[in-house]
Image (spheres, rainbow, N blue to C red):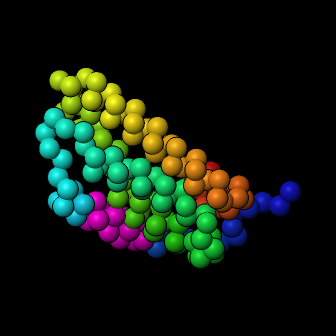
Amino acid sequence: MASTRPTWVVPLPLGILVVAIGGALGAAARDALLQEWPVAPDAFPWTVFAINVSGSALLASLPLFAIVRRTPWLPLFLGTGVLGGFTTMSTAAVESYDLRHHAALGIAYLAGTLVAALGAVALVNRLSSAPDRALIEAEEGDD
């Protein structure tokens, strides 16, 4: 069986640069959404929930695009960079802690985020092939 591993390697300085630029863009997009739809104290944090679920689905969708599979630095830029900066599981953890006095809501938020994000990934993964997913994973250093 032929390997799906690409024959090209992104030079480390370029990899660092594209991840840093992508991460800044992703974090700026997340911040803009949080500014537009701030999370009220003691309420379900819908904005971060939506960011994490949509970011997970978008990350899973990268193998669908031939340009991403063909361009050595693009998985790093879009996946590790943009979507890594956009999604924010650390904020989800802090918001879960902030809901500690509302145990049912905090548990619903934690479980709901996990189930919805994994469900989104599973759904989107059905649209791409295993070799295409393996190629993107190898480029992001997930192998």
Residue 98 sits in quarter: top left
Please give left or right for residue 137 compared with residue 131 in the image.
left
Residue 9 sits in quarter: bottom right
Residue reaching furthest left? 41
Residue reaching furthest right? 1
Residue 130 position, x and y percent, is 71, 55
Judging depth in this view, the residue of 8 and 100 nearest the camera is 100
**Is residue 99 visible in the rendered structure shown here?**
yes
Identity of the residue drawn at 61% across and 63% down: 63
The magenta stretch spans which residues? 16-30
Please give left or right for residue 56 compared with residue 37 in the image.
right
Pick the quarter of the image with the N terminus. bottom right
Residue 10 position, x and y percent, is 55, 70
Question: Is residue 114 found inside the magenta-colored segment of the image?
Answer: no
Q: Is residue 69 above or below residue 98?
A: below
Please give left or right for residue 103 compared with residue 124 in the image.
left
Main SS class of the magenta portion in the image: helix
Residue 127 sits in quarter: bottom right
Judging depth in this view, the residue of 63 and 84 nearest the camera is 63
Identity of the residue drawn at 16% across and 35% down: 42
Q: Is residue 103 above or below residue 126?
A: above
Residue 102 position, x and y percent, is 21, 25
**Is residue 12 visible in the rendered structure shown here?**
no
Q: How many marks?
A: 0
Judging depth in this view, the residue of 38 and 8 nearest the camera is 38
Please give left or right for residue 66 compared with residue 105 in the image.
right
Residue 38 position, x and y percent, is 17, 52
Identity of the residue drawn at 17% across and 59% down: 35
Identity of the residue drawn at 19% across and 38% down: 43
Judging depth in this view, the residue of 142 and 26 nearest the camera is 26
Question: Is residue 19 found inside the magenta-colored segment of the image?
Answer: yes
